[in-house]
Image (cartoon, rainbow, N blue to C red):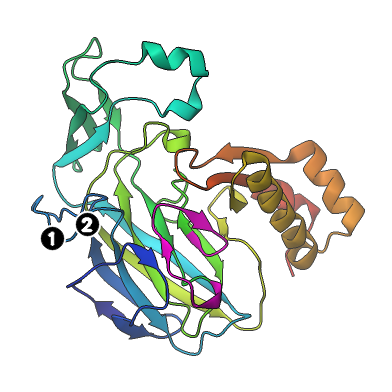
Amino acid sequence: MATHDFTPTHYHTTLGTHDPVLRIADGDTVVTTTVDAAGHDAANQRVTPPGNPQTGPFFVENAAPGDTLAVRFDRLRPSRRYGFTKTTLAPNVVDPEYIAEFPREQRQRGEWDIDVAMGTATLLKPETALGRLTLPLRPMLGCFGVAPDGGQAISTATSGSYGGNMDYKGFEEGVTVYFPVFAPGALFFLGDGHALQGDGEIVGTGIEISFDVQFTVRLLKNKRIFQPRAENETHILTAGNARPLDQALQHATTEMVRWLQSDYGLDPVGAHTLLGQCVEYEIGNVFDPAYTVICKMSRTLLQRIGNPR
């Protein structure tokens, strides 16, 4: 196990089989940085074109299709004081007839002061009835994942079974995320840091900002999964990425049923019964081409049922 300090020199706006920037092994930790969604670094200087630029990819030795890559986010911290947002709801999250009532200043940018030491984000602009609204930080990564299947290079604007632009606020420090491996080395990317974001990313942004990050990888050989999974202190969860929204829910629920049977020893009827009465859902992204639905199960409840295999 080794710790790698990596300074990016270039970024990608697609997830694909790009040349790796660093080769790492099972159990290794990487300390690195990300730029914001518009390509600005910790000095708020544009260093790459916009579009959720990704740091990576990181090649994990011995990772092969049919394996699972686990990535723990050890540290996710904003690396500057300035963050920005959009200020108008996406048209698809309101009734069509209400769009005519949208504010005229639709391209107006929200500007925020990010105080990591105090753990707060304070609205500076525009001037509204909110005044200097101050909110607690909840840093999370909006876009990250592995190279997709079939040698594809897929835009960081969307998401799929490989991860991508899921924009789920629960992908924060301390979470472990699991990905199916589609390409040799898995080729892990990460970026699109948010100091804070509500469910759905319904204005098209969180509070966009550059990040200092640290992550640790584990390779689960010959363990096959189909959609991204994750776990934190309170829940296990699965992510479905698709459009329409019901298909995203179907992907997430199917992956959870598989997980409950393969790792928690439940028979099909038991897994279905448990989900029927105890499942929790959250909405990730509803702004981008693919929507994200999160399916959750309580770890406390699963501990009452029995130990995972």
| Residue 115, placed above or below residue 47 | above
Q: Residue furthest bottom?
A: 62
Which one is nearer the viewer's eye here, 133 or 227? 227
| Residue 191, placed above or below residue 98 | below
The reply to whether callout 1 and callout 2 are in contact (CB within 8 Å) is: yes
Q: Which mark is residue 35?
A: 2
Which one is nearer the viewer's eye here, 156 or 265? 156
Per the model, the C-alpha gap separating discs 1 and 2 is 8 Å
Q: Which mark is residue 47?
A: 1
In the picture, measured across the screen, residue 53 lies left or right of residue 73, that is: left
- Foreground mark, 1 or 2, reads 1
Which one is nearer the viewer's eye here, 222 or 246? 246
SS class of the residue under badge 1?
loop
Residue 263 at what x, y percent from top left? Answer: 74, 66
**What residue is shown at x 78% (from left), y 58% (from top)?**
306
Is residue 2 visible to us here?
no
- Residue 211, magenta (yes or no): no
Which one is nearer the viewer's eye here, 38 or 132? 38
Residue 174 at what x, y percent from top left? Answer: 43, 56
Q: Quadrant of the C terminus?
A: bottom right
Q: Residue furthest right?
A: 269
Is residue 9 visible to us here?
yes
Residue 8 at what x, y percent from top left? Answer: 20, 71
Q: Between disc 1 and disc 2, whose residue precedes?
A: 2
Range of residues picked out in magenta: 149-163
Amino acid type, label 1: Val
**What residue is shown at x 51% (from left), y 81% (from top)?**
183
